[in-house]
Amino acid sequence: MSWTKRQLIVQAYSELGLADYVFDLSADQLADAMRKMNSMLATWNAKGIRLGYPIPTSASGGDLDDDSAIPDSANEAVYQNLAIRIAGGIGRVAPNELKISAKEAYSALLNLHSVPMERHLTTDLPLGAGNKPWRQSDNQYIRETAEEILAGGDGPIEFT
């Protein structure tokens, strides 16, 4: 089972030296951190980093005790990058070690969870060395394909 949203936020605060057992987080601080986390993960989702995080439809949507649905391999990147985002709002400066670690975790996250965008090949692109003219036709370039159907950023359209 993945971490809850509250656990990710508390861990982000503890990365800044504000551990939960020493510093009691107010409801406003938790709500602000959750808005920033929702915004950050929505931006990552738009960039093609699909983590399965349920992005709410409103700014105040979601509950702190909901399951984040983020895989365990992405937790460190989420709470460290969230810590950097919330540091300025609480009058802290994120340590350089945290920034370096967050960048490394984000890079590892990109390698594991990003989905490359599909591209439509143009008709002026050569077929390549393996496509000899005697195998199909005398056309040595990519053949035109059917017109694309735009399905949005979530993936292909499935017909049942």
Image (cartoon, rainbow, N blue to C red):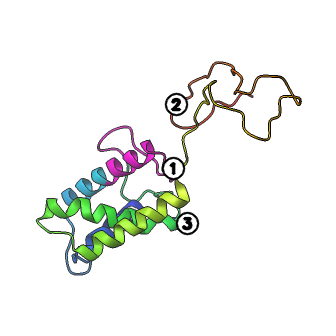
Q: Which mark is residue 152?
A: 2
Is residue 113 positioned above or below 147 on the image? below
Extent of the magenta region: 37-61
Q: SS of the residue at dot 2?
A: loop
Q: Earlier in the sequence, mark 1 or mark 3?
A: 3
Residue 98: quadrant of the picture: bottom left
Visible residue check, residue 70: no
Cβ–Cβ below 8 Å for labels 2 and 3? no
Q: Nearer the viewer, residue 123 or 153?
A: 123
At horizontal 53% and vertical 56% (from top left) the residue drawn is 113
The amino acid marked with disc number 2 is Gly
Q: Quadrant of the C terminus?
A: top right
Q: SS of the residue at dot 3?
A: loop
Check disc 1 and report the residue beneath it. Answer: 50
Q: CA distance from mark 2 to mark 3?
A: 29 Å
At horizontal 60% and vertical 27% (from top left) the residue drawn is 122
The amino acid marked with disc number 1 is Arg
Check disc 3 and report the residue beneath it. Answer: 1
Residue 136: quadrant of the picture: top right
Residue 44 x/y as whole percent: 41, 49
Q: Quadrant of the N terminus?
A: bottom right
Residue 101 x/y as whole percent: 35, 72
Visible residue check, residue 90: yes
The amino acid marked with disc number 3 is Met
